[in-house]
Image (cartoon, coloured by chain):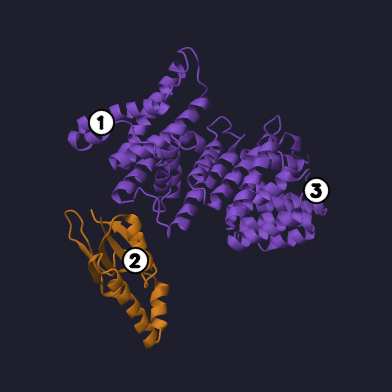
Chain colours: A orange, B purple
Amino acid sequence: MKYVLMFVETEEFAEELEAMGDLEREDAYAAVGRWFAEHAGKITHHTYLAPAHTATTMRLRRGEEPVVTDGPFVEGKEVVTGFAEIEVADLDEALKTARSWPACPIVEIRPVS
Amino acid sequence: MTGSGSERVSREALARVVRDHAGRLAASLVSLLGDFSAAEDLVQDAVEIALRRWPAEGVPDRPDAWLFTVARRRGLDALRREGNYRAKLAQLTGGEPGVKDDRLRLVFTCCHPALSLEARIALTLRVVCGLSTAQIAAAFLVPETTVAQRLTRAKRKISEAGIPYRIPADDELPERLQGVLAVIYLLFNEGYLSSGGARAHARDLVDDAEWLASLLAGLMPAEPEVAGLLALIRLHRARGAARFDDREQLVLLADQDRGRWDHEAIGAATASLVRSARAHRRPGPYQLQAAIAACHAEAESFESTDWPQIVVLYDMLLHLAPSPVTRLHRAVALRYAVGPEAALEELEHLDRALENHPLLHATRADLLRVLGRNAEARECDERALELTANPAQQALLERRLAGH
């Protein structure tokens, strides 16, 4: 089955990353690189998104002009920062893959329909 | 047929037979069809028919074969209707499923952490224990449609999110087993607390919880926590007869007639707890709770209870599974092991965490009364009464406030 792992960053996590020294931050990025390498056999596709402040949201309204706003679709402290599509046997394997994710603290796992 | 047409089958006997066979059938049908939801529907159909027919016709000699035949017939009808006749038909035309017990896989699927806790409970009761939607609704005092929706959503999630039908691998097992035990424990608590109250005539969930724990204990003999949970349930049940008086009023442990406890059951449960704990040497929260229950059950009187030992067991429990409610229970033991002042002081640390927990206020009321601070005690009892929704607890607090 195919699943998408949605990586969700929290405000605290962004602050932690901000507070890190250069070396520490490099380590954190290297850990992410290692995770991708480790699971390369399962990952069919992945995307890293530009920061949330670059997001634009369009709300389409039937019969009316769409409304375009600055920012992501959910105004909140949690933002999706990237996706990885994986091909695994079942949800347990997807959970196991997500468990070792070394960066942002929330991962939503959803099957691809 | 074991029973002639006129012989009536009691509701309890019927529930027992269904429970013994429905889960087994569900487990093998899921294996056979590879489709959890379809298998579950077939079993439920068969169970509904059995519940209608067996009371009048008697329970067949081989209820498992009877249920399988009905389920297969329904399955073939459904497959014909749906047009995918050929694909799955082959799997149902074979004989009865083998004797292999697949229920462990079934339990782990029903208790998967990707399902909501409510869904896990409803699914386990329905699929593993063979309860009908109506029986689950009655046991939890919720509308049948709510339970039906929960079950439908859960079954959809299982198939659409790819929740597997298997026993977790060794590295996942401890955590996943905790999840299964939590469902059984919750079921037990729900049944235990509500017995004798407004739901006195509803299905006895404690019975289902004990049955599930014993099923699991049989299937996982190397897991001492499973044995611990089973012993815990049995130790509580052994004292069940003394928990309510003739007027269905809750009787506190201190006032219970210990002659009405089932001492044989207490001895057996304690012995199996000790045996399993010694064999595996892996203590855990359920074994410790069972050990505490055993300390109470084996005491000849409330006064002669080994309170210092209970305090030690609570300390170990808090070390493994810290929780404010456990700390509250420890405080009660501390009252008898050390004194009411020490217990009262301990409660102060729990004010914030258990502000809305009736037991904190009721316990404090008790301690204050012992110390002669009656006005403060009254206030605490009033607060506890505001917070509890349990009819038996309400009655007890009302009696206390009325000065009895």
Q: Are marks 3 and 1 in contact (CB under 8 Å)?
A: no
Q: What residue is pinned by disc 2?
A: A75
Mark 2–mark 1 Cα distance, whole angstroms, equals: 56 Å
Q: Chain of mark 3?
A: B
Task: Name the amino acid type tagged 2.
Answer: Glu
**Number of labelled discs?**
3
Quadrant in the rendering for residue B80: top left
The front one of B1 and A21 is B1
Give the SS element for disc 3.
Answer: loop
Circle 1 sits on which residue?
Answer: B93
Q: Nearer the viewer, mark 2 or mark 3?
A: 3
Amino acid type at circle 3 is Ser
Q: Amino acid at mark 1?
A: Thr
Residue B284 can be seen in this image: no
Work out which quarter of the rendered image holds the C terminus of chain B and state it.
Answer: top right
- Both marks 3 and 1 on one chain: yes
Q: Is residue B1 above or below residue B128?
A: above
Residue depicted at 44% across the width and 22% down the height? B61
Crowd band around label 2 with a 10 angstrom C-alpha radius: few (<14), some (14–19), many (20+): few
**Which of the two residues, A100 or B255, is positioned nearer the viewer here?**
A100
Q: Which residue is mark 3?
A: B304
Labels 3, 1: front one:
1
Q: CA distance from mark 3 to mark 1?
A: 64 Å
Residue B19, horizontal then vertical, whole percent: 46, 33
